[in-house]
Image (cartoon, grey):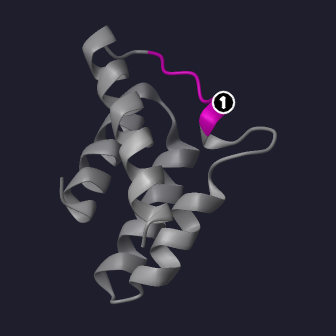
Amino acid sequence: MKFDKTLEELITLLLKSGENHWASYFTEVLELYNSGNKNKAHKKVLGAFGGMRSFNDIGLNFITNEEVDRVLEIKKWLYNYSKSH
């Protein structure tokens, strides 16, 4: 997976699910990444996980089970990718 394309897919699914806050959050990550601030982008991804009302706690409504599974797959990949960079 490519980091930027994966973020774009995630943002689309989050918007479709009505998760506008997280869509905006990951849009900021994408903007950081695309502007060359890759380290800051990875740190921002990691900052979304853990604690109350974190990205781990989102409720995905209005999307199919397959799309929910894809969001979960992307979440795991983004976390692991960002942690290793």
Magenta residues, dominant SS class: loop
Residue 69 percent across, percent down from the top left: 34, 20
Q: Work out which residue is located at the far front of the displayed protein and give it.
A: 84
Left or right: 24 as drawn, with respect to 54: left
Q: Position of residue 16 (x, y in %)?
A: 35, 30
- Tell me which amino acid carries mark 1: Asp
Residue at image coords 18%, 52%: 1
Q: Nearer the viewer, residue 16 or 59?
A: 59
Q: Which residue is found at the position 19% from the left and 60% from the top?
A: 2
Residue 13 in the image: x percent, y percent? 33, 34
Q: Residue at position x 33%, y 89% from top?
A: 36
The C terminus: image quadrant: bottom left
Q: Is residue 18 above or below residue 30?
A: above
Image location (x, y in percent) of residue 29: 45, 68
Q: Which residue position holds label 1?
A: 57
**In front: 72, or 15?**
72
- What stretch of residues is rendered in magenta? 56-61
| Number of other residues with Cα within 10 Å of mark 1, as a class: few under 14, some 14 to 19, many 20 or more | few
Q: Residue lying farthest right?
A: 52
Tell me the SS state at disc 1: helix
Q: Is residue 47 above or below residue 78?
A: below
> Left or right: where does residue 56 sit relative to residue 16?
right
In the image, is 74 to the left or to the right of 46? left
Residue at x 37% of width, y 20% of height: 68
Whether 84 is among the magenta residues is no
